[in-house]
Amino acid sequence: MLLNAIMVLIAAAIISAVPHILHRFFSYYPMVPLYLLTPTILAIIGVTGLVVSILAMYFSIRLGRLSDASAVHSTGIALLVLSIIGLFVANGFFVGFILLLVGSILAITWKP
């Protein structure tokens, strides 16, 4: 999920540079509304994906060090929320989402 968020941010940077390159060579902007909105939307998705993936890694590392059942369950719920957000932000059903979903369900149903 982290690599995907970084790739989306790189794509936003490249797409935001395209109108300037087109203006330099053709001196007009084809499909101006598309080029104006796409980098902004991709930047929002990329930053949100970056935050979600960093939080997911933090809570996953924290989950491995917990021994109290209530703390494990609450961390599992936080990971479940992050996995649902990651479904929409980090391009849907990929390995990071599925692993985060399975890990959060296992943490919620964990019994000491």
Image (spheres, helix red, strand yellow):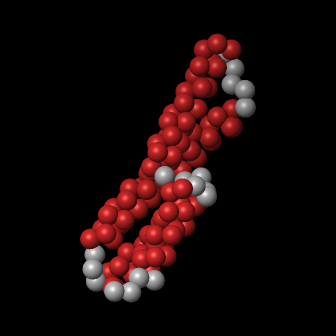
Residue 85 appears in the figure: no
- The extreme front residue here reads 112
Asked whether the viewer can see residue 18, the reply is yes
- Looking at the picture, tell me which residue is in the foreground, 38 or 61: 61
The C terminus - image quarter: bottom left
Q: Residue furthest top?
A: 25
Image point (53%, 60%), residue name:
97
Judge whether 31 appears above or below 54 on screen.
above
For the point 55% across and 36% down, the residue is: 11
Give the x, y percent position of residue 98: 55, 63
**Left or right position of 14 against 64:** right
Residue 10 versus residue 26 in the image, above or below: below
Image location of residue 66, percent across then percent down: 28, 75
Q: Nearer the viewer, residue 56 or 65?
A: 65
Measuring from the top left, give residue 93's x and y in whole percent: 61, 58
As drawn, is 39 to the left or to the right of 59?
A: right
Depth check, front residue: 105 or 23: 105
Q: Position of residue 103 (x, y in %)?
A: 46, 69
In the rendered image, which quarter is residue 94 located in? bottom right
Q: In the figure, is residue 6 to the left or right of 11?
A: left
- With respect to residue 109, does 3 lie above or below? above
Residue drawn at x 61%, y 57% as measured from the top left: 92
